[in-house]
Image: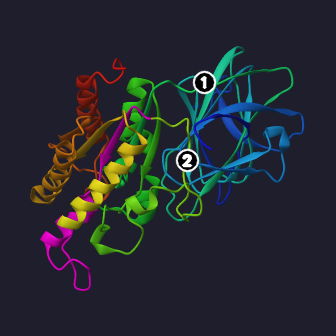
Amino acid sequence: MFGKIRGLWFLFSVGPALFVAASTCAAQPSVHKVPESPGLHPLAMYSDGRMLTTPAESASHFGGLDYTYQWPGSYFRAAFEGTEVFFRVVKGDEILHVVVDGRAVGSLVKPEAGVYEVNGLSPGKHQISVLVATESQAGPNTFGGFAIPAGETALSPAPRPRQIEFIGDSHTVGYGNLSNTHDCTQDQVWADTDDTKAFGPRIARHYDADYQINAISGRGIVRNYDGFQADTLPQAYPYVLFDKQQKASDPAWKPQVIVMALGTNDFSTPLHAGERWKSRDELHADYEATYLRFLQDLRARNPHALLIMWATNMAEGEIEAEAHKVVQQMQQHGDQRIAFLLVDGLTFGACNWHPSLSDDQTIADKLIHVIDAERIWTKK
């Protein structure tokens, strides 16, 4: 299950915890690790992103459920009336941003397992969000839920009526987008990747929409970056986690808009001896046929959604040309709720020539223009 209100609590572990405070002033809200307390009560939670829900081994006062996830861009929301709130980390080889009432409270970098408290809040109603910033290809992470102390009032966080899904590769993940240099180590890429600032969440915030980021850096439609062996995005897409043990299925997830960008990894490097395509023409034919099947499957599950495929003009226009062909084939098959967008003029100033924060804003602006032109939110 995912995308529904859940009565739970938060968990994250693995590695040392580093807290970056929004302010050192005692009057300001802050987040810090605390001993586990039995005097807490579960707080209903809304989350989005593909998640595997399992019974927690302990800490039933947080709701008794664990939420394991691996696709980027997952987030958790809760609402309450009071001055403090708690969440629990089970496994957290990641960076988490903690936001209260739309204001950044702090970030947890590879937080240790345990309970975290957000305090220093003024009396009244509050909304808390915990946002996953990093990519986790190596393995999933787990969140345990929220809780509040006795005397505070639990409020119900509501799902937003608008939903947008983003499917893609590193450009959609926000790979290294905080960096202002092209030369980055793997550790620097990890630390400088912030999906919450990538174009997808920017668009979702613009429309006050819930969102999913179903993207994996380095993956393509039929060929991964430089031909490396791993599941392509269409092969991984149907599953909750990258181990492919459970199919993703959520009746509540009905995005009105699905945005895709795939092809950079298929075409940005030359073919090597031993790959199954003997020529670029063979690669093109395989890409077009596989992408077409992927889009047709998406359309079957989302008959009313607006599909937007965008591409850059990288690889001397090869990516753009191939992606556009697939859109044209969908249109020739009678699908008129699909659009193609060329996004040019990007600086690619971030790690390993990836889109920078300013590029993320450019991409978001151009996609917003397409969505607005379709009047998607006013059509029945």
Is residue 182 one of those drawn in magenta?
no
Position of the C terminus, as image quadrant, is top left
Is residue 271 one of those drawn in magenta?
yes
Q: What stretch is highlighted in magenta?
A: 255-284
Is 310 situated left or right of 321 in this image? right
Picture colour scheme: rainbow
Question: In the depicted view, which residue is nearer to us: 139 or 18?
Answer: 139
Q: Earlier in the sequence, mark 2 or mark 1?
A: 1
- Percent across and percent down for residue 233 are 39, 59
Identify the element where label 2 is drawn: loop
Front position among marks 2 and 1: 2
- Percent across and percent down for residue 159 are 57, 27
> Which residue occupies 52% across, 57% down?
239
How many residues crowd around disc 1 within 10 Å: few (fewer than 14), some, or many (20 or more)? Answer: few
Residue 268 visible, this angle:
no
- Percent across and percent down for residue 281 are 12, 70
Is residue 189 placed above or below 25 in the rendered structure? Answer: below
Position of the N terminus, as image quadrant, is top right
Using the image, tell me which numbered label, if any, was put on residue 158.
Answer: 1
Using the image, tell me which numbered label, if any, was put on residue 249.
Answer: 2
> Which residue occupies 89% across, 34% down?
39
Q: Quadrant of residue 153?
A: top right
Q: What residue type is labelled 2?
A: Ser
Question: In the depicted view, which residue is nearer to us: 306 or 13?
Answer: 306
- Percent across and percent down for residue 79 are 67, 24
